Image (tube, helix red, strand yellow):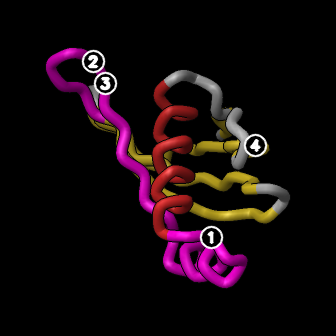
């Protein structure tokens, strides 16, 4: 994982062909956040896009995370899913 992410768990909620929708949770320095996203193919390989829940965004802001740090958390989530570092659950 990364310096901010302790654990990432992902559950596929829908799939058709090579496109997958997912939801998940992650621990950010001990605080649980929730997110959802999509994995889809493109030229050069798969792409991942995650979005934090509104509640999780508010929680991170209340904990003092800057917008830049939140963007880094989202990038780290994308990388964890793309690189197989996330735990996939049923």
Cα separation between marks 3 and 2? 4 Å
Cβ atoms at labels 3 and 2 below 8 Å apart: yes
Element type at mark 4: strand
* Disc 3: which residue: 46
Cα separation between marks 3 and 4? 22 Å
Query: Which corner quadrant holds the C terminus?
Result: top right
- Percent from the top left, x then y, of residue 51? 43, 60
Element type at mark 3: strand
**Left or right: 53, with 62 as reference point:** left
Cβ atoms at labels 4 and 1 below 8 Å apart: no
Cα separation between marks 4 and 1? 18 Å
Q: Residue at x 31, y 32 (%)?
A: 47
Q: What residue span does the magenta drawing correspond to? A: 40-66
Task: Compare residues 36 and 56 and report the one nearer the observer.
Answer: 56
Cα separation between marks 2 and 1? 31 Å
Label 3 or label 1, whichever lies nearer to me, is 1
Give the mark nearer the N terminus: 3 vs 4: 4
The residue furthest right is 30
* Disc 2: which residue: 45
Cα separation between marks 3 and 1? 29 Å
Crowding around mark 4 (Cα neighbors within 10 Å: few <14, some 14 to 19, many 20+) is: some
* Disc 1: which residue: 65
């Amino acid at each position: 994982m990364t310096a901010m992410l302790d654990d990432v768990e992902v559950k596929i909620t829908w799939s058709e062909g090579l496109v997958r929708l997912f939801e998940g949770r992650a621990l950010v320095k001990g605080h649980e956040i929730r997110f959802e996203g999509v994995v889809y193919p493109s030229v050069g390989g798969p792409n991942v896009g995650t979005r934090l829940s509104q509640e999780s965004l508010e929680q991170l802001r209340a904990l003092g995370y800057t917008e830049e740090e939140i963007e880094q958390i989202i990038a780290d989530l994308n990388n964890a899913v793309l690189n197989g570092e996330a735990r996939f659950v049923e």
